[in-house]
Image: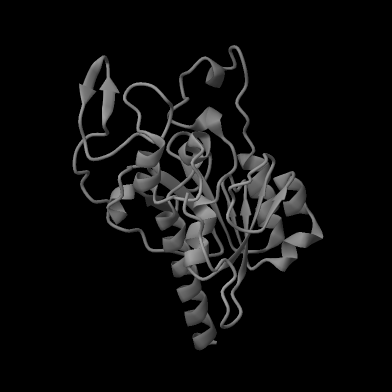
Amino acid sequence: MTQPTDIRRAGGPRPLLLDVYSCSGGAGMGYHRAGFDVDGIDIAHRPNYPFPYHQGDALERLASGEIQRYAFVHASPPCQAKCSLTIGTNQSKGWGGAHEDLLAPTRELLDKTGLPYVIEQPNGRAEIRKDLWLCGEMWGLGVIRHRNFKLGGCTANQPDHLRHRGRVRGYRHGEFHEGPYVAPYGNGGGKPTVPELQEAMGITWTNVREELTEAIPPAYSEYIGRAFRVSRAASRVAA
């Protein structure tokens, strides 16, 4: 695995961002590249997370006085029951198990902080305002990975949704299809190897499949982070 270098850059202050439900740090790395220092929090043990990290309850951290240390918050709360990949499954209907849904309490706590924030969710029925919709093809990545973002107290222009170059590689209804994209979820059906996932997502610091399949490409959050910093700089000049 390639470890990221220069995690805390010298040469001036960088705004501090809290990466909530941080997983392996796909979002965190994008914000780091956009000029933020990053702290992560996740309920699971994440030894591959490439920045300072706390294992604990994200909702408790959002409700604590610690939150005021930060200039910006990114959150990717679990909401599998409303994800397009799980809608219609037995578990999403409450049969045989339950999906965790922390979207609503996360959004309420973020609104109370008064800080600018981003909430990321997959396509589906998640009840968030969809201010931004991103696709891997916007950066020529090897995944499509459509994601919706609610922007609280910040803005970013919507990039054009470029025409997909072809199909996602893998089996569909028993037939195998080639294509320029890999499927960043699951294990069977012609799914990519871990090295293929790393290359397609732009994530090199973890080789854990589960972490890769849950992540967003850093290109997404780098785009959002740069837009936020540009808009804040313009606001200061105007003032």
Residue positioned most to the front: 1
Where is residue 208? Give x, y as percent: 51, 38
Residue sitting at 51 percent across and 60 percent down?
4
Q: Nearer the viewer, residue 135 or 171?
A: 171
Which quadrant would residue 117 be assigned to in this image?
A: bottom right
| Location of residue 172 with respect to 198 vertically, above or below | above
Where is residue 20? Give x, y as percent: 63, 50
Instruction: Say how the picture is coloured.
Output: one colour
Where is residue 62? Give x, y as percent: 72, 53
On screen, residue 75 versus residue 201, left or right, reads: right
| Location of residue 167 with respect to 154 vertically, above or below | above
Residue positioned most to the right: 65
On screen, residue 55 versus residue 120, left or right, reads: right
Number of numbered callouts drawn: 0
Residue sitting at 61 percent across and 41 percent down?
103
Where is residue 120? Give x, y as percent: 51, 48
Which quadrant would residue 165 be assigned to in this image?
A: top left
Residue sitting at 58 percent across and 55 percent down?
50
Q: Split into 4 quadrants, where in the image is the C terminus?
A: bottom right
On screen, residue 169 versus residue 97, left or right, reads: left
Residue sitting at 62 percent across and 17 percent down?
97
Q: Nearer the viewer, residue 206 or 43?
A: 206
